[in-house]
Every structure is written in C-alpha cells, then in structure tokens.
Image: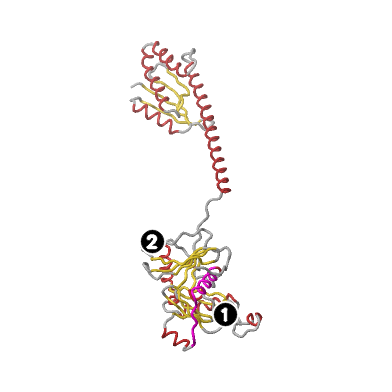
Amino acid sequence: MTGKTIHPILSGLITILPSHSGENILYWQVQDGVITACEDLQLGGTNSLFPPTGPDNRVLALVRTTDTVLGWSAVGDLSRRQAETAARIAAVQKSLGPPADIHAVAVLAPNLPTAGADTAADNNANAEYILTASISAAVLQSGLDILAAAGCDPDIVLPAGLAMTPPLEGYLRAQIGAYAFVRGSQLVLPDEPSLVAAIIGDTPVAELSTAQIENDLATAFAAPAMNLRTGTFAKRRARGGITAAQWKILAMILSAGLIASLLLALLTWVKYDRAIAREDAKTLSAIQKIVPAATNVTDGQKSLNDALARRGDSGAQVTPLTASVYSVVQQVPAVTLRDIRYNGDGILAFTLASSNVDGINQALLIMQQQGYKVTATPRQDASGTAMADISMRTR
C-alpha cells in the first residue's frame, strides 16, 4: 500500500482505540509521512504486541464514531479561549451520563471551504467555529489501558471521523476495518442505515476508496485536528536518559567527593596519631619517675613491673595493679595513661585520658569486672579532653 507524502519526517503507527481486550483491530505503519503497511492485530492473543516505535516516532489512536460525540459551534463575539470553554461545558452538559464521567475537548476548527467560493479570500471570510468532542472517561481509559498492555502508548487520540477530510458538499462514507461512518462538513455519523436516513434523508453518499482513506489518515497523522489526551489523560513524557555531559559532571562530583573524603580521613588519622604520640610521651614520663632508664611505653611497662616487684611486699601488691591498668589501656585504644603513682599503701593512683567519656567508662567497667575496687573523679582539661583521676585497690 502506498500513499502521497504528507510530512517528510513523521513516522510511527496509526491504530484504533479498542473497546475490549481480545478484539481484532487494524494498525497502519507510517514511514516518512507515508502509510507503508496495514496489519491486523488480535489483542490478548499469542502475538498481541504492536511493533516497537522509536522515541521520535508518533502513535495515533482513532476513536470509533460510536464512542464520541462531535459538535461545531460559532465563536461569535467571544474570545477564542472563552468560546472554547463555553463549548466544552456545553458538550459535557449535552452528553449522556454524569458530567464528572465525561471527558470533553474543545479547539478552534479550521475554516471550512464553501462550495461555490471563487477565491481563498472568500473561504477565509467564513465564520470561525469551535470543534468539540466528548467521550466517556471510562471508555477512554479502558482503551488506553488495553493498548498499553499491548505495548502501545498513543501520543494522540483522535475521533476517527475527524481523520477524514470534510467534503465541500454532500457526504462521504469511510470504511475503516470492521466499522464505517458518514462524514459531512459539520457532521459525523455512525453508518447505521436508520440513523443516516433520519439525518440526511436520500442525499447521496460518496464512497471513499482505500487509497483516499489512507491519504487522509496520513494527513491526520501529520496534523491532527485535536487530541483527546488532555488533562488527566495527557501522556506522561518519559524522562530522558543521562547525557554524556551529565555523566561527565556526575563523575567530577563523585571524584571531588572521594578526594575530599580521603583528605578528611588522612587529616583525622594525623590528628589522632599525634594525640596518641603525646599521650604515650606523658605515659612514658610517668613511668620514668619510677624507672628512669625506660625509653618507650612497651618496654617501660615491663621495667616498671620488675622495679615494683623488687621493692618487696608493696611491689608485689602493686604489680598486679599496674599490669591490669596497662592491660585495660591496650584493650581500649581510645584511652591513654597520663600519670601513675604508688605510695606503698596498697592504692595505685593514675589518670586516664580520652577524647570522650565513653572510652574512660569502658576502661572502668573492665577494671570492675576484674574485681578491683575503683574510685574515679572525672574532669576535663583546657583542650576539652575527658580525663579521670582514678584510685585502684588490690582485690
């Protein structure tokens, strides 16, 4: 099947808004404004999916004449916006069913050429009209849902009667798939003999050929007279993917965040390393009061225990205490030993320091669990470091 070129860039699909799932409907493939194929699709069958369309392609769905009511009204002295609003309200009021269940659209209709007009100026002098279409909201939603299940999301929903070019005079009959309708200049009727006879009488009706119908469909595909997908039925546009430039910006942000995190971690490590070094120096100074030859905290602990043990009974008593203190300091890295004193009365006095009280509390809890009698006096030095002066008795 071929047709005349209407629009050089528009491609996609034309189909029919279904009334129920499982029915057979036609769809037309459009390539560069030309209808290239007409296929039959059984919805809900084994092969019930429409062919995929590209993101720049258009999908047009035609609504059967039996499901829509069309109307034309003169603009008169009203502004275009006022005329469209008034016409839309009137279309809802004239429709069957509660107004809340009716979806109506009103647009400015193109000037209709008049038979016998000699010039374009005569045609442009015709009165302007507002074109309205109303449809049951439930019918429209049901049709869109059925199409969506078949992989089709129409960009435009158009009453089928408006897809045919109106005649200058008389009436035309168009057969689209399994149903037909009659088109006049301001009239669209389902092709039901009794209804047509009651409206137009014995006026002859010209039959549109398949080629003419496809040409008119291609024209409507490129420039539809209206779109019922408005308001709550407007198509939701999918968000575009991330562009290469956006990926580049995102990568730069992530890189900057990673570098900042590494710098922060490095600065924190340097800060705590220096703080530990200061506390170790203070601990070593405390040990050197008893063991002047001590050169580092680890060796100083053993030398201190040996020196205290050599003092005799009092040394024997304090050795377990000092061992326990150093064991706790090793178990709680956040705690450092500031000072340690033993006066030979069975009480070991020392000072613990930490960046917060939680570390000190953890150390005290371990000592108490080991069975030592501990008395602590908390305080804080000028730099904000949490400290505790502790007295510890043997068990």
Q: How is the image coloured?
A: secondary structure
| Residue type indicated by callout 2 | Asn
Q: Is residue 105 above or below residue 125?
A: above
Kindly report the distance in space between the C-alpha atoms of the residues bearing marks 2 and 1. 44 Å
- Camera-nearest residue between 108 and 306: 108
**Secondary element at image label 2:** loop
- The residue carrying pointer 2 sits among few (fewer than 14), some (14 to 19) or many (20 or more) residues within 10 Å by Cα, namely few
- Residue 343: say if magenta: no
- Mark toward the start of the polypeptide (2 vs 1): 2
- Residue 210: say if magenta: yes
Residue 389 image position (x, y, % from top left): 45, 26
What residue is disc 1 on? 129
Q: Is residue 36 above or below residue 334?
A: below
Residue drawn at point x = 36 percent, y = 13 percent? 313
Mark linked to residue 47: 2
**Secondary element at image label 1:** strand
| Residue type indicated by callout 1 | Tyr
Majority secondary structure of magenta residues: helix
